């Protein structure tokens, strides 16, 4: 194969931080090359240097053997390098065609927009991708997957020869991710080179040809997919083998009291009727295929979404839980699936995110907040949960995904919540941070907390949960415990209902 891209001894420093040190990366024409590493390993910084957003302090970029210096993103795009960020760069109120040609619109001889020509080209791009897109709808009305494909269409319209995909499947369903992989294979067949960043190692083995791993801003190694396995990649990424990713489960206490019991919950008239109970000090898993109704039931129980009918008991007492304020007053906290839009205010400091639901705890004289007490209290909550940040005034949006999740947990513990609902808590975080979340969850149950754990990751369900309620088409079809919790049993019930 021909080498299309070579990065040689790339280094980058920010104030107080060596982000990259002597990084080498070689990418062959028409290959899908995985770039792996924990959050903070330097992946995004390296890709921003390649795409002209950052300038390297040392090192050089060679494209087709010719040294190139991209002073801006536009220069990289002109050379055929395009990046699709995890956070989309689309204008929500513009339609797909307007987003694709933004800043480089086609015009007629007298300066009028050639809307017809742009629309025809956009339609051809989506037809090539095998995607049906409403070209007249604002992109905010499109699904996340459709927005992802608008980004890809925009890159292809720029004649990208090197396409960088940063966590493209983070918010896609398995079927949508499968379609994306089909498109990537088609692009590869037409000679497009791709650099693929993902925390899902199973995706790497499904779609990639070679893998390069970074750790702490340094180069670790490059290997072909067929010459490695998950254990080796994990060891390269975190510097140690995760022989036991999940902490040991304690003996199941069948006599533990029921802390939260939901009886005869029906989301809408004619919908399945479900019941479950969460015991003291346990992790109860909600498992099932995407769309099976796991999150919907949990949110209806705690009043985040409406229910047609429900009977809820907290410590044996009947409660209404008609809204989240009452739920919080009972001491029940939710880590939502989308932490950035529903769980955090990312532009606020850690202190503000932890204390925001419990400001009354820090009232000083009169109606004023005692900010010293707030700072000290939230700092102690950070220490208890293990949030890695300089201090409580650090901005949440600058933290890694794992630390952002810990901030949400710290908020609820600061509010004295004893029941925690974790909805996909490890989505979009790296393997090392996942292991920290697993250990934290088990430590919390050891301290008397009870956890309702919703996950699409089968190994998490099997490795973490004391009991598992399995969903299919909106109904709990089985509840497993102890040795019954294994991959084959969970999938059998989830796919057949039997």
Image (tube, rainbow, N blue to C red):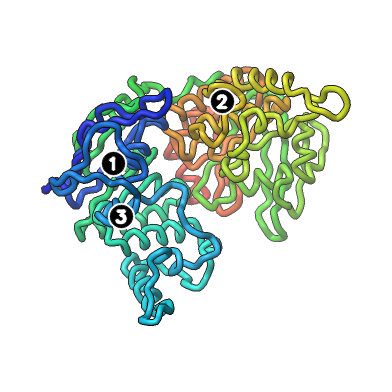
Residue underneath mark 2: 441
Q: Nearer the viewer, residue 296 or 2?
A: 2
Horizontal and vertical percent position of residue 227: 19, 34
Disc 2 residue crowd, few under 14, some 14–19, many 20+, Cα 10 Å: many
- Decide which of 270, 346 is in the foreground and name it: 346
Say which mark, if any, is on residue 77.
Answer: 3
Name the spot of residue 77 as percent of width and height, x first: 30, 55
Badge 3: residue crowd in 10 Å (few <14, some 14–19, many ≥20): many
* In contact (CB < 8 Å): disc 3 and disc 2: no
Image position of 334 with respect to 97: above or below: above
Dot 2 or dot 1, earlier in sequence: 1
Residue extending farthest left: 1
Q: Quadrant of residue 366?
A: top right
Frontmost of labels 2 and 1 is 1
Q: Quadrant of residue 377?
A: top right
Q: Is residue 258 visible?
A: no
Callout 1 secondary element? strand
């Amino acid at each position: 194969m021909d080498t299309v891209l070579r990065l040689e001894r790339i280094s980058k420093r920010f104030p107080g931080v060596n982000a990259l040190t002597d990084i080498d990366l070689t990418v062959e024409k028409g290959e899908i090359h995985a770039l792996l590493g924990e959050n903070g390993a330097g992946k995004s910084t390296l890709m921003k240097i390649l795409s002209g957003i950052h300038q390297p302090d040392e090192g050089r970029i060679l494209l087709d053997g010719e040294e190139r210096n991209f002073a801006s993103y536009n220069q990289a795009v002109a050379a055929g390098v395009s990046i699709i960020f995890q956070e989309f760069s689309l204008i929500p109120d513009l339609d797909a065609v307007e987003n694709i040609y933004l800043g480089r619109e086609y015009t007629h001889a007298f300066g009028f927009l050639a809307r017809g020509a742009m629309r025809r080209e956009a339609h051809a791009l989506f037809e090539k991708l095998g995607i049906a897109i409403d070209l007249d709808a604002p992109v905010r009305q499109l699904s996340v997957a459709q927005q992802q494909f608008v980004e890809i269409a925009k890159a292809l319209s720029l004649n990208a020869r090197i396409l960088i995909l940063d966590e493209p499947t983070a918010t896609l369903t398995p079927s949508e991710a499968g379609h994306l992989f089909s498109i990537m294979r088609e692009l590869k067949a037409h000679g497009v080179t791709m650099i693929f960043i993902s925390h899902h190692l199973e995706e790497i083995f499904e779609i990639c040809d070679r893998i390069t791993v970074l750790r702490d801003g340094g180069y670790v190694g490059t290997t072909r997919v067929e010459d490695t396995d998950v254990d080796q990649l994990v060891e390269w990424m975190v510097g140690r083998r995760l022989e036991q990713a999940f902490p040991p489960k304690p003996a199941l206490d069948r006599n533990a009291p029921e802390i939260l019991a939901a009886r005869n919950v029906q989301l809408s008239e004619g919908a399945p009727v479900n019941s479950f109970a969460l015991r003291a000090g346990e992790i109860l898993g909600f498992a099932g295929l995407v769309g099976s109704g796991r999150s919907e039931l949990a949110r209806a129980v705690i009043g985040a979404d409406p229910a047609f009918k429900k009977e809820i008991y907290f410590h044996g007492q009947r409660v209404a839980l008609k809204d989240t304020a009452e739920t919080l007053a009972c001491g029940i906290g939710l880590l939502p699936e989308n932490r950035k839009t529903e769980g955090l205010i990312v532009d606020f400091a850690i202190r503000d995110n932890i204390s925001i639901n419990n400001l009354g705890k820090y009232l000083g004289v009169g109606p004023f907040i005692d900010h010293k007490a707030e700072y000290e209290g939230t700092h102690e909550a950070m220490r208890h949960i293990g949030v890695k940040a300089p201090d409580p005034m650090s901005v949440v949006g600058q933290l890694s995904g794992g630390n952002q999740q810990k901030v949400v947990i710290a908020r609820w513990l600061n509010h004295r919540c004893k029941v925690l609902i974790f909805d996909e808590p490890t989505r979009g975080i790296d393997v090392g941070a996942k292991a920290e979340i697993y250990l934290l969850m088990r430590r919390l149950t050891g301290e008397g907390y009870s956890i309702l754990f919703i996950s699409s990751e089968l190994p998490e369900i099997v490795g973490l949960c004391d009991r598992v309620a399995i969903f299919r088409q909106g109904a709990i079809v089985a509840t497993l415990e102890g040795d019954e919790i294994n991959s084959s049993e969970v999938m059998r019930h989830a796919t057949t209902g039997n």
